[in-house]
Image: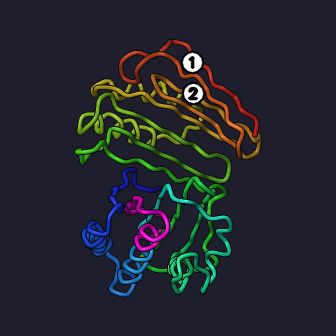
Amino acid sequence: MANNTHINFNAEDRSYFSILKKEIHNLVIKAGFNEVRTAEVDIVVAEMTTNLLKHAGGGEILVRIVHEFNTTGVEILCIDNGPGMADPTKMMEDGVSTANTLGQGLGAVRRLSDTFQVYSIKKWGTILLSPLYKERLPPDTVRAQAEVRSVIVPKHGETACGDGFDFRINLNYVRLFLGDGLGHGPEASTAVSKAIEVLNASNEYNTIENLKHMHKEVKATRGLVGTLATYSFSEKLWRICGVGNIATRAQCGFMAKSYISYNGVIGMNIPNTLKEHEVKK
């Protein structure tokens, strides 16, 4: 399971780069990365920031420490609103460049990362995802049936985030929860953290029962809004239920559908009768 909150670094101007690199360097050292692996993280960050400046005019770097595959890693997201890439696969080949450089940046990032993903659309921008673990994952690492990632950033000026995300995957189900504590800052963070703590203690995959139990257990907090969704691999069926002012949207390619949540606040007042949306996928 991954940590919730990313640290957001502004990469719009070269003057920020030295601070950005130093902060991420110190973060991975604190997480227990050795000297060699820390240097590899430094290279990845340096290549990403250079690409942002040369090809997109700047962007942002999001970083968080993750705990998965029985080890600790750092997840690095690079986001820009630049011109995008017509052929991302080709741009990862060494020697390919559109800016008269050596063309080794993305290739280096891919080689140093345990996995590397690129999403790019012309005239829209590019997103790079690069997780690096303290020890490189063996090629035969067993991965879950589904990959789940979240992006959560605190409100500007806050260190605690009132948003929270939780997931669990086993051979039969995926369970996803997204919550938003009322307000923002530490008290909102306490509300959503308590909700996730309650959910983590439950091996139940019944969406309605989990929401009702969560509602009962978080009454001492200021409350939250949230959506809980489970997916059954055998049934190929999503079950979705949300409470409060929170949007839920299922998207497959360019097809998307939104689902209405019930009025209420988890921990304060929820309807006596809750029903799930069932979505066959």
x, y (%) of residue 170? Answer: 61, 52
Picture coordinates of residue 245, whole percent (x, y)? 45, 23
Residue 82 percent coordinates (x, y): 51, 59
Nearer the observer, 35 or 103: 103
* Residue 62 falls within the magenta-colored stretch: yes
Mark 2 secondary-structure assignment = strand
* In this picture, residue 231 sits left or right of residue 113: right
Which residue of the protein is positioned furthest toward the top in this rendering?
Answer: 272
Residue drawn at 57 percent across, 31 percent down = 207
Numbered disc 1: secondary structure: loop
Viewer-nearest of discs 1 and 2: 2
Which dot marks residue 241?
Answer: 2
Indicate whether 242 appears above or below 113.
Answer: above
Three-letter code for the amino acid on which mark 1 is drawn: Leu
Position of the C terminus by quadrant: top right
Identify the residue at horizontal 40%, vertical 59% (top origin): 60
Magenta stretch? 49-72
Q: In the rendered image, which residue does mark 1 sit on?
A: 274
Q: Are marks 1 and 2 in contact (CB under 8 Å)?
A: yes
